[in-house]
Image (spheres, coloured by chain):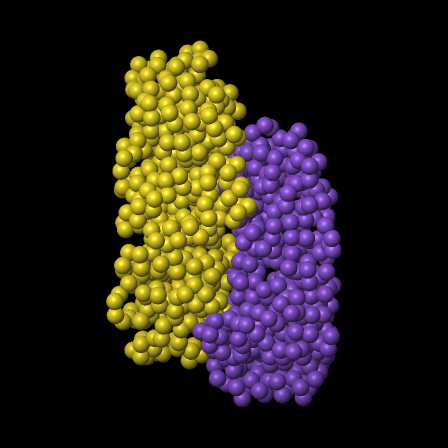
Chain colours: A yellow, B purple
Amino acid sequence: MSHYSSFKFMMEPRSVAVVGASDNPKKVGHIILQNFIDMGYAGKIYPVNINSTGRIAGLKSYKSLRDIGESVDFVVIAVPAEVVPSVLDDCGAAKSKSVVVVSGGFAEVGSVELQRQLADKAKKYGFALLGPNCLGVMNMRNHVNTMFLPLYKFDSPKLGGVSFASQSGAVGSTVLDMVSNEGFGIAKFISYGNAVDLDEVDILDYLAHDPDTRVIIFYLEGVKRGREFLEAAKRTTKVKPVVVIKGGMSPAGASAVRSHTASLAGSYQAYEAAFRQSGIVQADSLDDLLDYAKIFETEPLSKGPSVAVITNGGGAGVLATDSIYDNRLVMPELEKETAATLRKAMPPIVNIRLPLDMAGDADDKRFEAALNAIGGDPNVDMIITIALFQTPGADSAVAASIINYKAGITKPLVVVSSGGSYTQAHRRMMESSNVPVYSSPEQAARALAALYKYSKTRGAIRKTK
Amino acid sequence: MSHYSSFKFMMEPRSVAVVGASDNPKKVGHIILQNFIDMGYAGKIYPVNINSTGRIAGLKSYKSLRDIGESVDFVVIAVPAEVVPSVLDDCGAAKSKSVVVVSGGFAEVGSVELQRQLADKAKKYGFALLGPNCLGVMNMRNHVNTMFLPLYKFDSPKLGGVSFASQSGAVGSTVLDMVSNEGFGIAKFISYGNAVDLDEVDILDYLAHDPDTRVIIFYLEGVKRGREFLEAAKRTTKVKPVVVIKGGMSPAGASAVRSHTASLAGSYQAYEAAFRQSGIVQADSLDDLLDYAKIFETEPLSKGPSVAVITNGGGAGVLATDSIYDNRLVMPELEKETAATLRKAMPPIVNIRLPLDMAGDADDKRFEAALNAIGGDPNVDMIITIALFQTPGADSAVAASIINYKAGITKPLVVVSSGGSYTQAHRRMMESSNVPVYSSPEQAARALAALYKYSKTRGAIRKTK
């Protein structure tokens, strides 16, 4: 928990200084400063620029941190690489509490010696440093945001419980922008680039203790302190899920990592084993990363591997069944009582078995009856409800029946709804009510498998059946 | 080519009869009839209903096909299962050219004998029969469409070169609705359900010869005539790509298939081997099916397995590199000349190697220079261009530079752009100009691997390097 307070100064600062602040809209320092102003950051803002003539972006500005006359909680540095060491001396002199260096041009382009100076200065002065070569931090709760992206390029995600740490700034900003289309929200974002001081271990420890963070997702390129990272992960996964996508798993990818963030990627086997041992859920793609974040954000742990499929489209039920077995989950037999209840509730053309194909004319009443009967079956641990809104029977009453049922169930339940604008409208209905919705049966099954894996880590699986 | 003309009568009929036509908006026969009227079908339309009193949906109606007095090209039957055999007798008497039975209630619910009557009648009278238990056909060129879905639930795909055959109606309609969000278009759709007469072999033969169809995608549950299907696939894949997703690959999925379309699913190994031998590209998920359709619709065959990655986001380039190797493709070394050209065109911070990370400030000029140099490198067979529009340098000029370059290149090129509304606008720009765009590096690499696989089937790979 060593650097918990460092991150707190970055995420909840009472005052912010932007070094490299500018009135030139093309400068990174301009974008960062302007974003703080435009997003309504409530603390004090100090623009700093060596060429300052007194005002930048309408605020009183300073030539140096030393001129501010108070110790600033959070300093964002956006100046050319070679100037950064001297700005860090200013941070030391001004007793700055935490520092992000967004500037690039260090080890990733061969300037190893220059980068070493950053680490030395942070150590010498005793402040925590994030970066260099990164986007910094974002806190969805208070609009602290050092990302130097024009706001119009970027759909802001909603506030939620998923925190995202990314070694790559581009992967970070892209994923955040993608999240805006998904049904879950973001708590904190940390882009940490070359990680000369604060690294994966510090980030994991901070997010493990951050009360706003319920799920941690991570884009990693390399891990500097392997053993400590594993220990931190073991501690963290005991209280909240950690999903990691690791760049550089192939030899060619590992070589690309060296020129990207100057990290050592390590072997595929070593990482896989380490992730497994520490309870980390590994994502094989960016799609998986988002799909897993979504299920962890809303769903409880599972008590077992049995998945029931309820569908209004037979073929989609078949594909879901295949995917359940592909992902080493199983489909249970229904209890006799459940079957008898369903037989009464379903028309004769419906075969009473799993997957339960309720036919294309299934309406909200049929969905409700199926969910009640199957959700109560002790053989069923998790549920995939496939609601294809192209079918004649499906409309907003079906979405409402799923939302209502979901509000009372303690088993994991996900929905599959795929299609165009009519379907998207119903997806949004369900997602805004904390029902996780997937675009394909395969995605839903993969997400449930990730949830089951983590449920085992947490010891949630029932002992006898 | 036996049933080519049967399908032609369905897809390009001069006259259509809807048996079971109704003024009751809840009836399937009503929806089908109304869709023909509303979508502006140009041929003659005959509503048929045994209880007809002279007019249905404003058109002159008939009690029986026998009363029409001319031989109808295409009869769509939407009446209860037990009445279907007698309607087929009417078809025989009236010399109908082709018949679709959309009604369900046959072998899929145990009514095997009733289903056998359908096959016998089709044989006896010599017309071709599609179904039962299906959605029928859609031809994007002339608005022939027997799908009994309310139009407001369904975004129509645009006209294109991908034809889709689906044993499952729900998978069929869902995929078509999903396609509306993708950059490619549809030529023909065939939903064939229980396949008592026209089956997978006939469909493949028809689509192989259909000049509007450039790519065939298929959702299969079972194959009735295995050997003939393989032969038909071998013939077809010599002229156009065939992508298949097979439902019922797992034992539990196979059991679900029996109660869905009463088909025998067969073993996973047998299907995989058969697909491989016949040059069929297998899709493992609905997502793959769409992703592969997209690349086959626009891209030429590849001459080899080498993929160059050009990116404005380092981490995304790392993930693309990993995925290229995961999918058994390779990343080449650049020729010295290419490297020298790039060195001149790129700023010093850019490492001249693949993946080429052009940094977050890369603009259209940098994209253009990279595409020109790398696209012309003889070591490069295919290109992934990652354009992350959240970055400071990327805007519509970048999209335009990719579109312009794409128009002149004969190597396969795909784009990865992921994100929210700003990105979606640029995706649409590129996709409407025949540039295939994917949401993740992993999807792009999988699609290129499918293209490479099919390129080998077609003998397009160069012999020496």
Q: Is residue A322 above or below residue A145?
A: below
Count of numbered circles on the image: 0
**Residue at the farthest left position:** A463
Q: Could you tell me residue A26's position as x and y percent? A: 53, 24
At horizontal 39% and vertical 76% (from top left) the residue drawn is: A353
**Residue at the farthest top position:** A53
* Nearest to the observer: residue B433 or residue A261: A261
Q: Could you tell me residue A204's position as x and y percent? A: 33, 42
* Nearest to the observer: residue B231 or residue B158: B231
* Nearest to the observer: residue A319 or residue B272: B272
Asked whether, in this view, residue B196 is left or right of residue B372, the answer is left
At horizontal 34% and vertical 46% (from top left) the residue drawn is: A230
Q: Quadrant of residue A67?
A: top left
At horizontal 46% and vertical 13% (from top left) the residue drawn is: A51
Asked whether, in this view, residue B331 is left or right of residue A159, the answer is right
Q: Is residue B262 above or below residue B215?
A: below
Q: Could you tell me residue A428's position as x and y percent? A: 42, 52
* Nearest to the observer: residue A74 or residue A389: A74
Residue B409 appears in the rendering: yes
Image quarter in which the N terminus of chain B is found: bottom right
Residue B62 appears in the rendering: no
Q: Could you tell me residue A117's position as x and y percent? A: 41, 24
Q: Quadrant of residue B297?
A: bottom right
At horizontal 55% and vertical 34% (from top left) the residue drawn is: B359
